[in-house]
Amino acid sequence: MRFALDEEQVALQRAARRLLERWSPSAAARDAMETERGYDDALWQRLAADLGVSALLVPEALGGLGLGPTALAPVMEEMGRALACAPLLSTVALGTNALLLGASAEQQARWLPGLASGERTATVAFDPLGDARRSEVRAVRDGGSWRLDGVVTQVLDGHTASLVVVAAEVAAEDALALFLVPGDAPGLARTALPTMDRTRRLARLELHGVSVPPADRLDGPLPGAAALRAVLDRARVALASEQVGLAERCLDMSVEHARTRVQFGRPIGSFQAIKHRCADMLVDVESARAASWYAAWAAEHAPDELATAAAMAKAWCSEACFRAAAECIQIHGGIGFTWEHDAHLAFKRARASLALFGAPANHRETIAHELGL
Amino acid sequence: MRFALDEEQVALQRAARRLLERWSPSAAARDAMETERGYDDALWQRLAADLGVSALLVPEALGGLGLGPTALAPVMEEMGRALACAPLLSTVALGTNALLLGASAEQQARWLPGLASGERTATVAFDPLGDARRSEVRAVRDGGSWRLDGVVTQVLDGHTASLVVVAAEVAAEDALALFLVPGDAPGLARTALPTMDRTRRLARLELHGVSVPPADRLDGPLPGAAALRAVLDRARVALASEQVGLAERCLDMSVEHARTRVQFGRPIGSFQAIKHRCADMLVDVESARAASWYAAWAAEHAPDELATAAAMAKAWCSEACFRAAAECIQIHGGIGFTWEHDAHLAFKRARASLALFGAPANHRETIAHELGL
Amino acid sequence: MELRFSQADEAFRGEARDWLEAELAGAFSVVRGRGGPGDEEALHDERLAWERRLGEAGWIGLGWPKAYGGREESLVRQVIFNEEYARARAPGRLGHIGETLLGPTLIAFGTEAQKTRFLPPILRGEELWCQGYSEPNAGSDLANVRTRAERVGDQWLIEGQKTWTSGAHWSDWCFVLCRTDPAAARHKGLSYLLVPMDQPGVTVRPIVQLTGTSEFNEVFFDGARTAADHVVGAEGDGWRVAMGTLAFERGASTLGQQLAFQHELDAIIACARENGRSQDPLIRQRIAHAWSGLRIMRLQALRMLSAQADTELSREGLVTKLFWATWHRDLGELAMDVLGPDAELAEGPGPGELTPLQRLFLFSRADTIYAGSNEIQRNIIGERGLGLPRAPRPTDTRGQT
Amino acid sequence: MELRFSQADEAFRGEARDWLEAELAGAFSVVRGRGGPGDEEALHDERLAWERRLGEAGWIGLGWPKAYGGREESLVRQVIFNEEYARARAPGRLGHIGETLLGPTLIAFGTEAQKTRFLPPILRGEELWCQGYSEPNAGSDLANVRTRAERVGDQWLIEGQKTWTSGAHWSDWCFVLCRTDPAAARHKGLSYLLVPMDQPGVTVRPIVQLTGTSEFNEVFFDGARTAADHVVGAEGDGWRVAMGTLAFERGASTLGQQLAFQHELDAIIACARENGRSQDPLIRQRIAHAWSGLRIMRLQALRMLSAQADTELSREGLVTKLFWATWHRDLGELAMDVLGPDAELAEGPGPGELTPLQRLFLFSRADTIYAGSNEIQRNIIGERGLGLPRAPRPTDTRGQT
């Protein structure tokens, strides 16, 4: 029993923090969020090359590091802390996991090396409410191939991903299946959506008779819906870790401000109204961290517990992170309300993350269901 | 437009406070709550004789004062503040209102004078969840009379009331009707229930073939279920006022303690943790007062608004009162945890009132429904 | 207890409603619904013309004494006008700082010369005012003002910086709280000056807010000047005058604001109906709670209107700001949760291109901060409303706001 | 990262579980599930026998050094034993104050003579201890202790009053924080004395709590005496010794407590299933949230167990008390809401005849007050955990708890 980061995970986290402090300070994120792509490809390449984030989960035989979700957790914390703009959540937590959990060995061998190297990015297109049982895309047999039609709104980094794993309903089988669609596939129209949180991009994907060869229907040990559910759970876990990092960033900003800002002749952090709020934020941060670590551990070692653990982590970390970001503005007062201060970037990211991959109330309903209520 | 107590209502409130301060101090309530009856009849007679509380709503022609629900509100606030043990909520808010809203002129003339004088007490037996559409009692024709069978749990002051208005289902009519049953009617078994809040009694009533003459089926302008609904709404309004008074009592106790209790060399009320909590209690008390006054006004002048107003007042005042009582214990610390301190009497009453006549969530659902959601 | 307005007051309401409807149906229809939070810059010229039309028709200074050109209407009627103004979705007021803050302050503390000079242009909708109180180091702690004014001959010479000044770039005048006696402690030694904005010593710089838009400004005074007699109240008496202005700001006239809130709540309910979340029991609870809170806000305002005593000191008056600010912030969160994942989708790619509910969500975070943060409000309620003791402090802060 | 226990530790768990099952199936089956909150008076003699049986079997002082008769087991194993103890519904411990507070304090601060005299009877379950810290005027502000002890010959003479002393009426000894130097300020001049309870100068009076039952006492010292060498640490050094005891009290051994919480949550869930409220979406949300909180509590405890550093100073350690106290209080409210109107119905007409869920509801209100109220916890977290500045205070309170 050792419920703590391993040494190499601590080292990875330190390296991630150093890299992001150097290459993704607030100004860089602000630049990236004004681009159409929504991220700085140079940063992404650095994360891939210097830190191996894109290779983290990929088996060593396929050019990866062969690590598990518990290694991704500390990296995601740092991504959240830095409010970094990079297609990590989409490429690794969604795309790579989809191939790991849903693809055959052959399919993995074909696609994972490109993802591991950082050369390609990926995402998964699924129901925006995070429901793994439904899709607005239909797949039908069309000669030897599959033909995909439909619309998916709010696909994470959907306008830039080189590879899109599309969840589609196969009416003939009354089941969901996952299909690999290159970003530039004929018939695939991708539109970046304007969003309130400008640090992470969503896109609308329209599929008009997109043709997918049989070899690109995912064919792993888990059937489509089950694979998608596990992918979403892993993505929730990664997002939960990101939320922990962002919440801690908000706490750190708040504490720093509370220590130095003087009103009524005292640092405002000496007032209980502020001090106790910071204390509650620490309770939130540490409890959220425990929840996110546990969910990462379950993803790696206890798949039976993953559905509940991921739901718990995502619900808990979402609310902890949103509260922290909201308090951060309140504690900063007027200055926290300005565009030039980072508080609003955190606040908008926290709000967007709250709803991404399912809202807290949905996750608690999942838990209630799993408890047999 | 004058949204404030009228002069005579202010005078009534002052008189009620004086009377209760003299005759119902904490020690008296503690004595009363240890009796089987659950209240001190001498206090009840004083409330009736000196203050006319039992006559408040009864028309002048029937020996009453002919006032409306807005006059009852300030009296109920004082009853709450004093944590008084008396069958006012049952006799006036339930029993008298049932006769006023559901009985014919003849029935009113027969029963209201006895209630107005304080000679008799009354209550209404209905579903403990506060649902006016259902009853566990069935009424069937039996020769020229009605025969009532069934059980009602948690009837307010049901073990002592001289007169019980019983809501019963008349299967032949597929409707609810109200029947007048004397407390000592043959076939009526009444058992006082042990309760956590010892300042207000509930009883279980079992009706085994209770015979009710036709003249004692309520026969007013409103049919049974509609009358019962209006009665319950008026009772909710009265209880909401009581909750305001109790909440203010908790606030006053807390402020007094916070002003005088010294820790770390300062009165604890100078610490923001305590001061801000008291401030939030004041917000609760004043907003609850506004809600309860409005509901009383609606009961008197705008019956169309009553269902929503009563639901709003009961939900809002219930939670305000419970929070105030809970904070009162917290602010008092250890001493607030002792039997000898009044904080627990308030806390238990607040908890009991929260669920009485329907819980806040039910009332909010009523509001949502009335908003057409 | 009577919640209905008198027949005479309802007749007044009808008069206001008819006038607003008629005016906003004609040439001014373009300004209808414009100039609200996040839209303050819209159609400035048209809204200026609207101010003048309001003035012509006698709707400015409704409550001012007749002696100073007002109509001396009751608080109830002022509130009724505000309600109808909001109900008609008449445009955001450019002149409200002058009408509701500076005007009453001059009437209470000004010299006859000041009243004669400044009140009529306000009533005509011709001169616009802004407020110079907050500073980077004097936010909640207003007594910490550092902007200095020095008497040089027949003028005041002003050096310093104000912030969170709304409308500074379109205003003709600013009332500025300045330190005129640097030796005096905190709220002593302050003076309340009236300063013309159109002069070389005044620079206005917009503050970009978290919405990507700019409704507020920084104002830099760099050798700005005003006439020696443009001080309100005695020299050194500025704190008392400024506190008077804040009292006006926190008065009972929140019923118009509540109608704006009602429009927001209605939009949220409509949205819930459309996307089906109106059937979600959790959302139903929160909508019912929000509806109740808004109703209670209105009831509290009616209580204040009904009170005989000074509303500023009443308990229900003290809790108003904290209550509505918190309610409004929660409403913004409810709006996002009702929208679900769609909450993210903005109107366009530009930083300020947000949907109305996104603007609500973001702007309402300021409500618990400005004009006395929730924390300050709780101090005031605890100390003035409940008589709880003040904390020991290194400096005297009796006049904190 | 590994959440599972090692094979060796699981073997230890099996040993503990088997022993507890066997013992509690036999003569001690009568004490199973007894002596918990609100039931502290139950079956005193039988539970005293149980203490001795525990001592005989070597289950007391699991973590104490072998040199002092302990088994020197790891913290993990102590926690495992606590978990199994709770899982087996073994009775509330009479000897836990001696074992977990006084024993470790003596081991850290006591003389060899004190260790020799006092440790063995604790390990054998033969001498019971109670804690004399709180006073009517020293609740959260423990440094304000007024109970005085004066050295007279070879004895201490003690005058004063302690309160909230659990088990005082059945204890053999009390460790008492006394002021021995009346001239010294606050936490200076205090001493930590060991006082026998069975003497004329000690009077115990039960405190009736809001549950109608008495689990705590007032203890009056009226010329009570103890030997001069029954002072732990130096004279005047009592504050440091007492703070050490509190550190033991707040250690990581909360996993047993969490199993008791789990039993309560299970009872609530069973109740919701039975009365159908398990289908109410609002109740489902709250149960899921409570379940998550409890799971997180366990995870936090495992984090502390895994930490190399001093757990008392870690951030996750600092937040423990506030987290569980608030969680438990909320659980009590959830229990009542799940019960609905039935929440009111007690087991009998007497003041103490409450249902288990009513006891939970009422007792859990104390959790946010005792052993450092939520307010004190937030101060500690803010100041020690986050380095926020202390408030200016009229007196020095560095050692507040």
Image (tube, coloured by chain):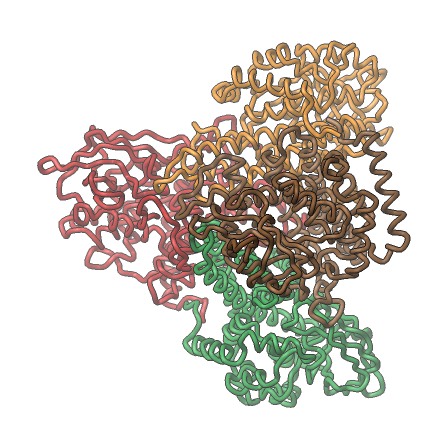
Chain colours: A green, B orange, C brown, D red
Q: Residue placed at 62% from the left, 48% from the top?
A: C326
Q: Is residue D278 visible?
A: no
The image quadrant of residue A218 is: bottom right
The image quadrant of residue D148 is: top left
Hey, which residue is sitting farthest left in the picture?
A: D153
Residue C113 in percent (x, y) is at 66, 43
Q: Is residue A47 or residue B193 the one in the foreground? A: A47
Give left or right: position of D204 versus D155. Answer: right
Q: Is residue D352 or residue C222 the one in the foreground? A: C222
Give left or right: position of A286 versus C44. Answer: left
Give left or right: position of B98 versus A59. Answer: right
Task: Classify the position of the N terminus of chain B by image quarter.
Answer: top right
- Above or below residue C33? Residue B124 is above
Give left or right: position of B247 versus B112. Answer: left
Q: Is residue A156 or residue D395 the one in the foreground? A: D395
Residue A127 in percent (x, y) is at 73, 69
Residue A53 in percent (x, y) is at 54, 81
Residue C101 in percent (x, y) is at 66, 46
